[in-house]
Amino acid sequence: MIIKNVVVGPLEVNCYIIGCEESREAAIIDPGGDADEIIRVIQNEGLKPEFIINTHAHFDHVGAVRAIQEHFKIDFLLHKDDLFLIEHLDEQVMQFGLDRVAKPEVNKFVKNGDNVSLGKMTIKTIHTPGHTPGGVCYYVDNNVFVGDTLFAGSIGRTDFPGSSYEQLIHSIKENLFPLGDSVVVYSGHGPSTSIGNEKTHNPFLT
């Protein structure tokens, strides 16, 4: 499995490019900005993008979606419960005093339990509401891409519209912890960690 991390945008979002080593087919997770840099990495690796999948629809995670959609002519996948965030993208950006971002078109919706094929790999969708109502995580080959659901030593913010602290804690403990302690956690900001490490050391979860 190929995993490339590109830190993008003013809020330093981790955009992940994951790919099948055999087919070179790739998915782009959370392209939050700096579309040219993401495209450059994809081309340098000789990858063939198949789709964009987002963990959620906060502006800092979708800022480059439209440009990448148009460049590669690929679909954008999102959970339907976060569609309202796309519809209010301008308001999101204004709250942070940043430049407007191009509104992407959601081509397909994902839901809990969906399996998305990527070459010889299967990406499992896990609905983890709390940070946003439509927050999802993507599990593949003992790795889970969690967006802003879980961080090394912390959890996502729950002071946004549609957020819920209780729901987020439930999502992490009931939907992510059962994946197993050895699973590597790739967060939307900051370093990677593991399920086992967060079970033991995360002050919000112990």
Image (tube, rainbow, N blue to C red):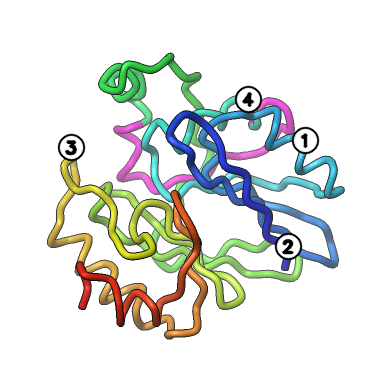
Task: Please state the horizontal and vertical placement of residue 24, each as a whole percent of the image.
Answer: 82, 57
Q: Which amino acid does label 2 sit on?
A: Ile
Image-based side of 1 in relation to 123, left or right: right
Instruction: Identify the residue at image location x=36%, y=24%.
Output: 89
- What range of the chain is rendered magenta? 69-85
Examine the structure image and report whether residue 158 is included in the region drawn in magenta: no
Q: Spatial distance from mark 3 to mark 1, Cα to Cα?
A: 35 Å
Q: Spatial distance from mark 2 to mark 1, Cα to Cα?
A: 16 Å
Q: Which amino acid does label 1 sit on?
A: Arg
Q: Mark 3 points at which residue?
A: 161
Instruction: Identify the residue at image location x=75%, y=70%.
Output: 120
Tag 3 and tag 4, C-beta contact below 8 Å = no
Q: Spatial distance from mark 4 to mark 2, Cα to Cα?
A: 23 Å
Q: Which amino acid does label 3 sit on?
A: Pro
Report crowding for label 4: few under 14, some 14 to 19, many 20 or more residues within 10 A (C-alpha): some
Report crowding for label 1: few under 14, some 14 to 19, many 20 or more residues within 10 A (C-alpha): few
Report crowding for label 3: few under 14, some 14 to 19, many 20 or more residues within 10 A (C-alpha): few
Q: Which mark is residue 40?
A: 1
Q: Spatial distance from mark 3 to mark 4, Cα to Cα?
A: 26 Å
In depth, the one of 1 and 8 nearer the eye is 8
Helix, strand or loop at label 1? It is helix
